[in-house]
Structures are given as C-alpha cells and as structure tokens.
Amino acid sequence: MIAAQLLAYYFTELKDDQLKKIDKYLFSMRLSDDTLKDIMNRFRREMENGLGRDTSPTATVKMLPTFVRSIPDGSEKGDFIALDLGGSNFRILRVKVTQDKKQPVQMESQVYETPDDIIHGSGSQLFAHVADCLGDFMEKQKIKDKKIPVGFTFSFPCAQTKLDEAVLVTWTKKFKASGVEGMDVVNLLNKAIQKRGDYEADIMAVVNDTVGTMMTCGFDDQRCEVGIIIGTGTNACYMEELRHIDQVEGDEGRMCINTEWGAFGDDGSLEDLRTEFDREIDRGSINPGKQLFEKMASGMYMGELVRLILVKMAKEGLLFEGRITPELLTKGKIETKHVSAIEKSKEGLKKCMETLTRLGVEPSDEDCLAVHHVCTIVSFRSANLIASTLGGILARLKDNKGVGRLRTTVGIDGSLYKMHPQYARRLHKTVRRLVPDTDVRFLLSESGSAKGAAMVTAVAYRLTEQARQIQQTMAEFRLSKAQLLEVKKRMRQEIERGLKKTSHQEATVKMLPTFVRTTPDGTENGDFLALDLGGTNFRVLLVKIRSGKKRSVEMHNKIYAIPIEVMQGTGEELFDHIVHCISDFLDYMGMKSARLPLGFTFSFPCHQTSLDAGILVTWTKGFKATDCEGENVVELLRDAIKRKEEFDLDVVAIVNDTVGTMMTCAYEEPDCEVGLIAGTGSNACYMEEAKNIEIVDGDEGRMCVNMEWGAFGDNGCLDDIRTRYDQAVDENSLNEGKQRYEKMCSGMYLGEIVRQILIDLTKRGFLFRGQISETLKTRGIFETKFLSQIESDRLALLQVRAILQQLGLAGTCDDSIIVKEVCGTVSRRAAQICGAGMAAVVDKIRENRGLDHLDITVGVDGTLYKLHPHFSRIFQQTVKELAPKCDVNFLLSEDGSGKGAALITAVGCRQRELVAQQQH
C-alpha cells in the first residue's frame, strides 16, 4: 500500500518537475494577458490602416469591403441556390426560406468532387465544371426552367466593388487554376453558364466563408455581427460603420468587412512573438513570409508546430531518451486531429501513446505527459492569439456604437473550434478577460458557408425588391423640370385670375390689395407702435426710427398670452384684452400721454379697402371669436380703445406678415420688392403695377399685393402632382380641401406627410419590422424640427436612430437610412414647388416692366427657410433654373411683423402728409 502511495507521490513530483521544464523551454509560447492586450491594440491599429484611404494600399490586414450591408431581419423568404467552392469538394445547396416558425429553413444539398486536374487546370475548365455541376443539380431538383437567385461562397481573397462581383486577388489553399487571378469570378461563371445555354441563373451575391458564417448565425440571432473561421485557415469579418470605410462611397449605415486577418504580422509587427518553430514552419511553407498570423494560429499548421518542437526536444535529449526516427522527421506526420485527440481529458494519454508509438519513438509515460503538455501550450497559444484579434474587433464595435457595454453575438465555424476538446472554452474565457465590458454570445454555425451564401442572397433579394418598391413610392415626389415648369405656369394663370375683376371672386389665389404703395426710402422718422397678432401670443412693440446719416431702428417689446377662452369668446372680449395689454405696455414704457401712430400686423386673411381698413374674411389657426368675420378689424380696435378711455392711438395701417417681411428687407435693400414666408405656413407678396389690380381704382404707380398663395390648387389644378399621402394629410386636417399648396410645402405639414409615408412603408413590411407603434399613429409627432435634425449632414445614422428612439420608434440602421431618405424627398419637393411659385412671381414682375433681365431682392422669413439644412439651397436653385432671366437675391428678414409694421406705418404717415400738402 505504502509503495503505491510513494509511487503516486513520485509520479506527481515528476510530473510537476517535467511540466515546469517544458514551460521554461516553451516560455516564448506562453502569452501573458498584458502581451495579449498589446497584440489586441496592434491589431486595432492594423484594422485602422486597412480601412484608411492612404494607408490601405500597404496595409497587411486588408479589411476588404464585402458589400453585404445588413444581416437577416427574419422577414426573408424565397427559394435560393447556394454554391460553395473553397476546398477539394464543391457543394451545391437549395435553400428554401419560409416564415414557418417550426422550420424556417429547408435545405437539400449535394457534394461534387473537384478533381486535381481541374484545380490545377485552366480557369475556363474550372468554371465549366461548376456550371456542369449546377446544371446537374437543377436537373435533379426539376428547376431548370426557373431563374432562381444564386449565392456563391468563394473562399479566396477577392476585391469587391459590389455584391455580385468579385475579382480574385490570389489563389490560396491548393488551387492554381490559370487565368482567374485578376478576373471577376461571377463573370467567368456566367459565361460558362451561357455557354451551356440550357438554364439561367441569377448570381446575386459572392461571399467569403466568414461572411457566410456570420449570416447563417445572423438568421438565428439578429445580434450577430461578427463571423469567424477557425479551421484549416483562420479569418474574421464584422459589421463596420460605412463612414469609416474609405474605399467605399457613402457614410450611411454599415457594411460587412472581411478582415483577412491571417496576414496580420506579414509586415514584421509580430516578430517579437514568433518563435524559432514559427519561423521554421514559414520557411517550409508554399508561401513564405505570408499569412504569418494564420501560421501561428490555424489548424493547418498546429500539428506541424508540435512535431517541430518534439524533434528539437528529442535532439536535446529531453524526450524519448534522445531517440529520433525517420517518421518523426517527416513533415505532416502529426496532424491537428492528433493534437485534438491527445488533449481529450479521458483517453488523451492513451491516444498520445498510440500516436507516438506510430512514429516509432518508444515513448515512456513521462514522454506522453510531456507531449500532452506541449500540445496544450501550442493549442492554447492559438486560442489566445485569436482571442486578442477578436478582442480588437469587439473593442472597435463597442467604440463605434458609443455604448458603455456591448451586447453582441459572434458566429463561429471551422474544424479546429468544433473538434478540439478544450479550444472553444479557452477562447471564450480569454475573450471575456480581454474585453470585460462586453457580453458575447458564441454561436456555432451549422453548414455555415453555403447556407450563409443563401442568406446573403435572401437579404440581397429582399433589399433589392424593397429598394425598388421604396423608390417607386418616392418617385411620386420627385418632380421633373417639366413638371416644375408646369407648376410655375399654373401659378401664373392663377395670379392673373386673382387680379382680374371678372374672375377675382372665384379665384383661389386671392391677390389681395394691401394699399402699401411704396417701400421705405430712408426718410422715415419718429416713434411708432406696432401690434402683432397671429397666434397664441400677442406682441406690443415700440419702434423708434431715426433718419439721416446714422439711420437706426430701436425696438422695445413685450409678449402677452391670449388665453384660449379669449380666442374663442366674443370679439369684444378679444379686443378689450388686446387694449388691456397695450395699456400695460404704455405704462411700462411711460408713454400713455402721446398719441402714437400704430401699425397692426394681423396675420389672418383680410380684404383691405384702404391702408387702415381690413375686413376679416375668416379666422384661422384656432381663433373663433364671434362677431369679427366680415367686420373691419381696425374699427373693432378703435372701438375698444374708446371703451378703455385711458389713451388715444392713431391706427395708420393694417399689415399682413409677408408685407412686413418685404418692408423690413426693403429698408436695408431698396430693390426688395417681394416678400416670402416659408415657415409654419407659406405665403408671398410683391409690388404689382396698379393698372393690373382691377379691383382697386387708379392706374398710377404700384401697390403691394398679398397673394395668399397657400390656397393655390384648391380648385384641383395641382391634383396631378398630389400623392395619396398628400390626400391623407388633407383629410386629417382642420380645413379639408383648403390651402392645398401650403399643405405640400409648409412646415406645419411636412412632418405629417413623412408620417403618412412611414405608416405605409411599415404596413408593407419595409420599416420597423412591420410593427406600427402607437407613436407612429399619433398625428403631429413628426415636428418639422425633427426633419431638420434628421436631414442635417453632420448627423451620423446613430443620431438619426436616437431621434427616432425619442419618438418611440426603435429602428435598425437600415430603417434610419429609409427614414432619412423619406424626409429628404418630402422637403426637397416642398422647396421645389415653393421655388416654382416664386419663379412665376419674379418672371411676372420682369414682364410687367418689359425687361429682358431683372435684378430683384426677395425678403424671406420663416422657420422652415431659416432652420432646415437644405430647404433654402434647393429653393434658390429652383428659382434660378425656372426663371433664368431673373437674377434674384434672397435676404433674410429680421422681425418683419414688428419692425415691418412700424415701417409701413411710417411710410403711411409720410404718404398722408404728401396728400395733405397736395390738397392745400
């Protein structure tokens, strides 16, 4: 009994002693966590180099774009064929993807031999062979008459410029078919298929096996965004932000990058970690100096590394009592499968004994223990190296997403990972240590590379079909120059109808006279009061205008709220409230005693009969005060001032905000004769020849006309460019059938148009996975400010996603791209039709004056024009294209409704004095 215990004790001692010796001997293969973190950082730098425009040509880690832009979202369906060419066998699969929950993917496959004479023959022979096998497969599946989408897994380094084209960079493994390198393999295969001429195939995608792995796992787990192969060779791919990929146009969304990480270290960056055994392996390989990382980590070289170590240890008398046999010296006698067998926990030592005995080295028990330990060190180093490069990818993903903790899935395939008993566990543990702030799920890929090609094809097929249908929808909003010229022509016709006495009554564009006959000339002087009523707030301003050399305008104002009960009470209550606010303001300014001239900005449709008389046609914007419609609002204000008996005012002018805008700009820029509001609402005014305004007496000089152009189209003249989305917005509005032009181009409605389109695209399954959220059903959620933010060029898609999340719309990157496109299309049309209207106005002024060429300034105000990132640019460009004989300068107005009203009042006082002088 004692003897047995002694023996066991002796054996453990010996074991520890022996193992320590080997640890020392293979010290350079044992990598500390610090070293692994260092490798991880080196790899991150290499990735940066591969992605950068200037650094990529010389980078060792090639970071090839694959043009795969999204992983499956679960809505894919259809019948696909996948070809898998990457080794001595060539597989063809038929993959049916359904929405059946129990068995979403059905596969039938067949393997075809690829003989050596074909692998080493000519390219045309190779592709003729592939086309023959595909023909045979389609025959057996009875689908020769169908044109089924095909995905092609081609596991060699390829340069791609689109999904369905791949130029072979270089053959690897044992392939050497001539005349293929530098050629597009899809083209070669298509030629071979056409040459047969008995079936058609639509090759939609070429993928690398790593991408196939990621896509296969991505079908089962939507979080999957990394694919790795750890088998004969090793490689990885992952989803990178497009804005970081310099070789590909565009910055929207993501694209899968094939890292080709096997070449990491080919520039010498891993020299300090390579051992004498690694160098010896490289010298004996078919591609010395190339794929150095792969040679340290992949299955193809692992057995050979172990053999070289054993030879050296035996030569130094550390193993087999120094015995060296011809078998032990023969390359390839120890394979990776032997290493896997030796490392099994139960029968490992027995397998070790068998393997070594076959090599004729007559191993002792200690020898077996030692060899087992050597295998462990070599395979553990491989898992550690892969963990560091994978760690580099995960850390990059985490940075790209800007999250504190990354949750992601890695799809893995490859014989070493699958067959080696300890490999997967070791890899997972090391990854978790190197990137502790990530939650990684490792998913084993089933029949990865081929099924993956079908998945890529399914996604490509879905996206192509989806893109086609979305473009079809968006096309209704894309107006040609001919269509825009037609809008301009019709606006001109409506202008004429509004000006003519005979048609004015039924005209939609009302062309209301304002009795403002001139723009400021700089002699205006004095103190003026201005009121601004146009919404839920009401402003009172004191404007001090000084003429002379130092022209200046000084303003003081106060804002008062109008309670809803006053907006919707009686007219008397409303005007008493207004006078109460004026009274408060005059007290505040200490000016109760002066009888100040007053200008009243009243932004509701008014029929004016003189500068100081305006009859309210109809309330808008939520006002409902009784006894006002059909009344002269100036008289209502004067009556209320009389009731108050505290002060007196001289009401000189009633002003529309567009006219105020024009006047403010004209004070700075004398040739400003047009005013435009492009904000919540849309309207314009301009200086028309008095003789053309038939509803006002007198033919001398000019008068400003308030067009009220928002109602353009209310007679149906724009129906050919209105979409079903515009109709839906109109039907849901407070004034159905009215202001149709305004509803296509003003800030108040653009978000609604976008919302209607998004609902439709979601119903059709193109957005938000077909789920219509409560938010999306809510009217008015898409404020125009969101459109401005979403369309800002500075915003990356992540920020667009954040805005959508604020709105309760959880979308993918692809969703964000579509939303951004919808917003851009809608606001572009708005700017264009608004520009077409303006082109009609400036051309009318040019013709009025009998000029070949007109220089004119337009004063502009409104949030849409001022805040939207593209509206003003597209609007100006449209005016330029549609009115080429006019040189139009656009000037932003500062406070048209306040300062503009005071200027109109000042001009009105000046006119009054002139008339008085003429009468004396």
Image (tube, grey):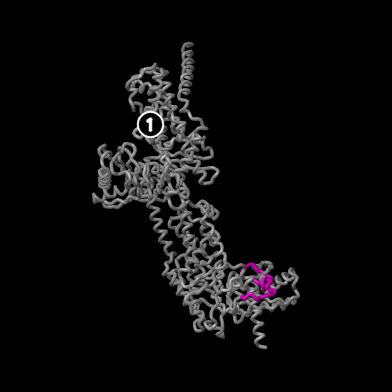
x then y, percent, for residue 597: 69, 77
Taking the magenta stretch, the answer to whether it contains residue 529 is: yes
- The magenta-colored residue range is 520-549
Give coordinates of residue 685: x percent, y percent: 55, 74
Closest to the observer: 655 or 82? 655
Residue in view at x 40 percent, y 31 percent = 420
Does any portion of residue 714 appear in the rendered image? no
Q: Is residue 292 above or below residue 108?
A: above
Quadrant assignment for the C terminus: bottom right
Q: Please say whether residue 572 is one of the residues in the magenta stretch.
A: no
Q: Position of residue 757 (x, y in %)?
A: 47, 61
Q: Nearer the viewer, residue 451 or 307?
A: 307
**Is residue 193 visible in this depiction of the protein?**
yes
What is the quadrant of residue 83 in the picture?
top left
The answer to whether 839 is drawn above or below residue 790 in the figure is below
Q: For residue 287, what is the image quadrant?
A: top left
Secondary structure, magenta segment, majority class = strand
Query: Of the residues shown, which amino acid type is indicated by label 1?
Result: Asp
| Residue highlighted by disc 1 | 282
